[in-house]
Image: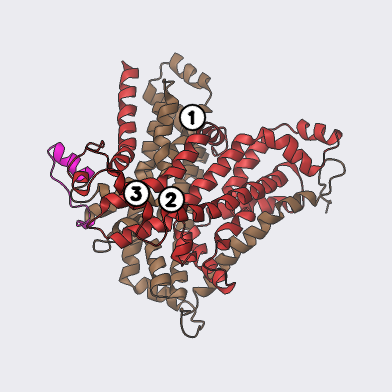
Amino acid sequence: MKKLSVYLIITAVAAVMLYPLLWLLGASFKSNSEIFSSVWFIPDSIDLSIWKNAWETATPYTMGHYFINTFMIIIPKTVFAVISSLLAAYGFARFNFPLKRLFSSLLLIGMLMPAIVKIMPMFLFWRDTGLLDTYIPLVFPALLAEEGMFVFILIRFFNSVPREFDEAARIDGCGTMRTLFLVLLPCIKPAVTSIAVFTFLWTMNDFLNPLIIIQSVKKYPLSLALRLSVDSTGQSYEQCKIIAVSVIGLIPSITVFALAQKKFVKGITAGGLSG
Amino acid sequence: MKKRQYKNPTGVSKYTGLLLISPFIAGFLLFTLYPFICSFILGMTNSRTVGQTEFIGFENYKTMFGSSSFRRALEVTLKYAIILVPLKLIVSLMTAVLLNLEIKGIGFFRTAFYIPSILGANLAVVIMWQYLFTAKGLINQFLELFGASPISWYGDPDAALYIIILLRLWEFGSTMIIFLAALRDIPRELYDAAKVDGCSCTRSFFSITLPQIKGVIFINLILQTISALQEFNAPYMITSGGPLKSTYTVGMLIYDEMFKYGEIGYANAVSWVLFTVIALAVGIMYLVTGRTERETT
């Protein structure tokens, strides 16, 4: 009996959580009038021309162009974020060095620092270096382990790997780097996957940074292209097209999440983020 | 003074670790410390996109506290955080407790609750949210279905803030998953012992669960407060701060001053005030939870 009521409650919550997304998917095939007359998500008829229209966008470029732009940011950024956080976490977890305590507290300070304070000086910094309207300001920070949270997660995972592994590797003649990549990396794979997926999703979601850095429409990532589609079609008409653009824009995030789901959830639940 | 020994495997210099974390240190100096200091200095100037920059001391701060639009934005932001953060923590903790009851299909439910939180910051979902609350949108259609009168979400200054609050509440999954991991770590023996002693479920929740996950509650509280006080994306896209500035957050004010009006100095001063508010909030929470910890032990 008690179990049943628990199921009822969580099923109801799950329905509330997922229905808007289902509705969004359904609405991307609906005509404007149908969107605002029916609560049911399944469309009366499927009109693929809306998607085709949406793909072509109101700009001179297709959605495909914006996808490529986004991946030109995401792929290097993800690789850089993984490598730089891995090195920093390895240093913190496995080595002793002068001022170690000071540097680990910097890690925490960096995590608590509100992003909004950084945004303007960084804008001025990139403006003065003449790199505005390029992808460098969006990608370069990842090379320097900007995301303290990632280093933090990895340190906790490194701590769970016995130090005997390192010693055994050393006896077999592995140097510092080979120990990391050949021995330790396979042990902390779930955490590395989580970091890569997080970087992917966060970059996909990031709006404020591209908004201030990228000026020419040709270089817009997906998030800015989405905003553009709202601005250029206005509020009162063509809602169905905007909704179709949104659904297309969500496809990469949903795909990556679905592919990595198992390892990813393991990575965040297995102690990484929990206190 | 005794010289500190750095214990490392033989043949590893004490600088190896330093070398490994050097990119991180460079990143901290360049992307955290530098903007932080730079922002403070700019906040003391009358720097604008055009014209001369002069040092004007605390003049920006004086203007700010005298300005009604700043006070209004601060009010809105605080109200938003005070409603959202406790609500989100309670919902995520309750759901995590339910999911922890050894039910079947936990994987499905965990994913279902988690998905909105990873997609929620995506602009596509923000746009979707905007449509849900229009005059004839899904929410009002549902209200009518249940016989309630539709709400003018975008016209009513009291209702508009709740569009944003509901969006962020809908994204409770990431907070929930942190709670869930912490609940898993509580030793089962504690509950068994409580059962033997005749404790009810509610009693063991308050006497075992809450004290055991105190640390995680604190972390979630801080993370959520920091992000709530910086809210920018949702009001910018959904309501543009309206109606009557009822959703105009400090984050939006900073953005407008900087990029719309070109008031670089003033914008930086505002962002420093926001930083101070966040630091104060975190500090107070730290003191309060620290005190309860001392009292209970």
What kind of residue is marked 2?
Thr
Q: Looking at the rendering, in which quadrant would you find the N terminus of chain A?
A: top left
Residue A230 appears in view: yes
Left or right of residue A192, residue B226 in this image: left
Q: Which residues are magenta?
A: B138-157
* Residue located beneath label 3 in the image: A52
Q: Is residue B65 magenta?
A: no
Q: Nearer the viewer, mark 2 or mark 3?
A: 3
The span from disc 2 to disc 3 (Cα, nearest Å) is 42 Å
Q: Do the numbered discs 3 and 1 sit on residues whose CB atoms are within 8 Å?
A: no
Q: Which mark is residue B183?
A: 1
Kindly check if marks 2 and 1 are in contact, taking CB atoms under 8 A apart as contact: no
Q: Please tell me which residue lies in front, B115 or B203.
A: B115
Q: Which chain is in brown here? A: B
How many C-alpha atoms fall within 10 Å of the one at disc 3: few (<14), some, or many (≥20)?
few
Quick one: which chain is red? A
Colour scheme of this structure image?
A: by chain
Mark 2 or mark 1: whose residue is earlier in sequence: 1
List x then y, in percent, for residue B61: 43, 73
> Where B40 falls versus B119 (above or below)?
below
Read off the residue under disc 2.
B225
In the image, residue B60 above or below residue A211: below
* Front-most of residues B114 and B200: B114
Give percent across and percent down for residue A160: 66, 33
| B176 on left or right of B26 | left
Viewport quadrant of the C terminus of chain A: top right
Residue A142 in the image: x percent, y percent?
60, 54
Same chain for marks 3 and 1? no
Let me know if residue B142 is in the magenta part: yes
Chain containing the residue with disc 2: B
